[in-house]
Image: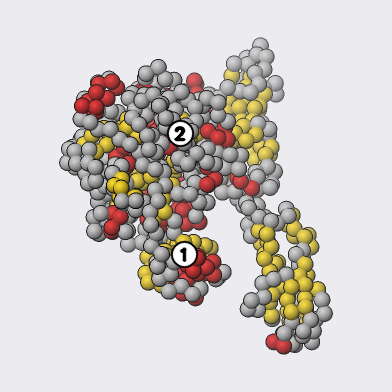
Amino acid sequence: MTAKAWIVAAAVASLCLVGLPATPSFAEEASETTIVVTLDGASSDAATAAKQAVSAAGGSVTEVRQITDTTVAVTVDQGGSTAARVGDRAEDRNGIRAAETAKKVYATTTDDDYYSYLWDLSNAADSHYGVNAEDAWPTATGTDVVVGVIDTGITAHLDLTGSASAIVGGNVIAGYDFISDTTSAGDSNGWDANPSDEGDYHTVDSTLVESSWHGTHVSGTIAAIANNAEGIAGVAPGALVQPVRVLGRAGGSEVDLVAAITWGAGLSVAGVADNPTPADILNLSLGGGASCPTSIQTAIDNAVAAGTAVVVAAGNEGVALANSFPANCNNVISVVATTYEGTRASYSNYGTSGTPATVSAPGGSAESGSDPNDWILSTWNSGTTVPSSAAYGWMVGTSMAAPHVAGVAALAKAAKPSLTVAQLTELLTSTAKDAVSCTTDACGAGIVDAPAAVAAAAGSPSATPTPTTTPTPSPSTETLSLGTLTLSGQAKVGVALRASASVSPAAATLAWRWTLGGTVVSTAASYTPPASASGKDLTIQVTATYGSQTRIAAKAVRVAAGTFVKSASPKASGTYRVGRKLKASKGTWAPTPTSYSYRWLRNGKKIKGATKATYKLTRSDRYKKVSVKITVKRVGYTSTSATSKSHKIR
């Protein structure tokens, strides 16, 4: 069935959709707050450790919910700045890495018109800026690759489950509902094994905002069933969607999102049976306006370490990516939305040099009066509040762009199941086609290209990168040989890494390419990771060329946080007598720290309230030894402390 026929069918059924704002405004409960506590390391009783830390910090604890062996949600009967201060004080306790008030995440849809053709999927309607998935299907359709869709859940749809009433079947496997707020969930039972979308309708200023069926729409873009004479086809029509519900009638919570990412990747969540079919890829078409919370970053890091790629929508506020999590977290594939014309959509958040985007994909145009061709058509539901009959609808946003990338990733993973997350990311970026009038920082490597990605994954010669230098062909019949690619130096912020590889014959040339988080950062043989590289995957690729022969080798490493070098220790100077004032010197560090904190010690123990650069000696100090501990910090570097020599007080 052609794209036009699908659109006519949808129009006859009057199934038109207007997207939701990226971050709807909801009234917050002022008298109760959840603090997400992240421990320094795994604990056999994380719940008790977190509760004790919050209680000792002045928190009036009403509920404790352990999510993992390092992450615990502690609810306190306090709100606003009071709860924030409790979290700050809890972070000062030993063993506590972070104690942050839980933030909200929302679906990243926008409020716009309708879409008309599947240009985003098949380069139809004279657009050349779709992902061209159809050309990849002869090689791979995504068979057996599991894509977890962390979203609003899913509704029954013949084009997804093969049934008008079931939410599991066809291309959809069993998932989970991680919405803990029963009012927001609409199902009265908190976390459970039923990810059915009960509708995310709500009111804003007494006006009803209809249910978005956001998760169903995202799922269709990824893996709607092909060749079944029904509706549309997904980017990876052989892939399996695993619905993981976190978004409800009041958005979603950070706590639930941590659990969803963890469970989706096949890792353990307290009180929940392990996921029997861990996702190869997680799609997060959601976000909130803040820096990346520690608990979310930890969950993502754990998922990636377990072999699960995390694809995240950039967000729809039209601002720098650094202002939207989880797209600004490390180790994610962040996705910017592009239009029918291949330009960055005006609503789409964008990358910067400090926080560059990874790739782009079709999301549609939200410009007033834009051509209806420039929207995204996918599976939907006709209900205005609660689920009704299956339908098709048009939506616009980075929420729509992300599942195109997740779908292409599924195609590549099916073509080569052994791909690691770093290799998959490198493959998506190295084969992307340029977006129109958009820098690599803003739009990442470009618009993902399904057939090129699949060809590269399958080892097709057509996917071999073009060498930066083409030498004059040698008349020799010698065979080109490329030795082992090695790295000298540590993969740490601020430390130079140098790549080397032997090559034969000697006349062959070597071309280097360093990529960080999917973005090319250098073409020299050496590279020094900046602070922004901390925690990210760094890949070095060398291409050897001799005449018409080409050999390629690559190596991926994780960049660790940098370490400070101390050339002069802190000192406590002054007259060491009761009533006199001592002054701390910071010591000398490289690189220069951006912040210093002070802690005065009496016989090696903390002096209450003594946290300034100066300290006035009291009678309690007489005949005791006093010193000062300086802690230095800088983004991308491990926080480090040093203590001055102690002096006996008279």
Q: Position of residue 346 (x, y in %)?
A: 48, 33
Taking depth in this image into account, of 292 and 144 the one nearest to the observer is 292
Point out the residue furthest to the top here: 475
The C terminus, quarter of image: bottom right
The N terminus, quarter of image: top left
Q: How far is the residue under mark 1 from the one under mark 2?
A: 34 Å
For numbered disc 2, what is the local secondary structure?
A: strand
Q: Is residue 78 above or below residue 532?
A: below
Q: How is the image coloured?
A: secondary structure
Within 10 Å of disc 2 (Cα), the crowding (few <14, some 14-19, many 20+) is many
Q: Look at label 2 and name its amino acid.
A: Ala
First reached walking from the N terminus: tag 1 or tag 2: 1
Residue annotated with mark 2: 337
Residue annotated with mark 1: 80
Q: Is residue 557 above or below residue 456?
A: below
- In the shown orientation, is residue 185 left or right of residue 472? left
Q: Position of residue 173 (x, y in %)?
A: 27, 43
Q: Look at label 1 and name its amino acid.
A: Gly
Query: Residue shown at 23%/31% (left/top)?
Result: 14
Visible in this render: residue 115? yes
- In the shown orientation, is residue 484 left or right of residue 60? right
- Closer to the eye: label 1 or 2: 1
Q: Position of residue 434 (x, y in %)?
A: 52, 25
For numbered disc 1, what is the local secondary structure?
A: helix
Within 10 Å of disc 1 (Cα), the crowding (few <14, some 14-19, many 20+) is some
